Image: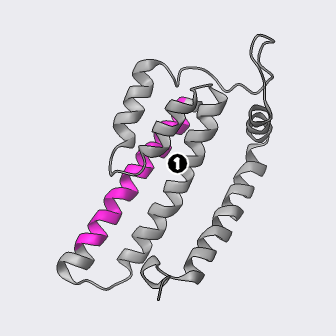
Amino acid sequence: MTITPKKLYSVVALAEMVTWTGLIIAMVARYGFGYEGGLFFVAGLSHGIIFMAYCITAIMIGINLRWGLGAITLAVLAAIPPWTTLPFDRWLLKKGKLDAPWALDAPSSSITVGGLDRFVRFWLRHPVSFFVVMVLGMAVFITGLLLIGPPSEWGA
């Protein structure tokens, strides 16, 4: 089974929405009903991981399919408000921005190729290595955030 840009983006956008829902449920349980169990930590961590995965996916697909800076920026910004990635996904589908296959080879000579394009194509040609690097990078980033504590304690 080949994972197309359309399928990958749609799955990650849906996962981002689902984890947003989990986080909102956990916030209502914690702040509305005083529940202090581990639900908030698990929901927050899972949403943070999927949020980063969504942003990386949107950027990589946007660069690879040549969406332009505006569409890539909107894709990343769509992850911030709850449940916005699904309508954005529908907009991308309507505009045909997810219809192309992966562009793994150099584009035609009529298109200027920069270092960023070559960087994205390199990682897309090596998906297992890309996945390992992303997982390790996110693990280091999240560990660093957990070590410095919640933002409410940064200025204390």
Give the residue pinned by disc 1.
Answer: 54
The number of discs equals: 1
Q: Is residue 16 visible?
A: yes
Q: Is residue 86 left or right of residue 107?
A: left
**Farthest left residue in view:** 33
Give the image's coloring scheme: one colour
Q: Residue at x 73, y 44 (%)?
A: 127
Q: Is residue 63 above or below residue 35?
A: above
Q: Nearer the viewer, residue 21 or 65?
A: 65
On-image quarter of the N terminus: top right
Q: Residue at x 74, y 32 (%)?
A: 117
What is the three-letter code of the residue carrying label 1?
Tyr
Q: Residue at x 49, y 55 (%)?
A: 51
Q: Is residue 83 above or below residue 109?
A: below
Q: Nearer the viewer, residue 100 or 76?
A: 76
Is residue 20 a member of the stretch shown in magenta? yes
Residue 135 position within the rendered picture, expressed as x and y whole percent measured from the top left: 67, 60
* Local SS, label 1: helix
Is residue 88 a member of the stretch shown in magenta? no
Range of magenta residues? 6-28
Residue 125 position within the rendered picture, expressed as x and y whole percent measured from the top left: 78, 36
Q: Is residue 3 visible?
A: no
Q: Nearer the viewer, residue 60 or 150?
A: 150
**Secondary structure mainly formed by the magenta segment:** helix
Q: Is residue 25 above or below residue 14?
A: below
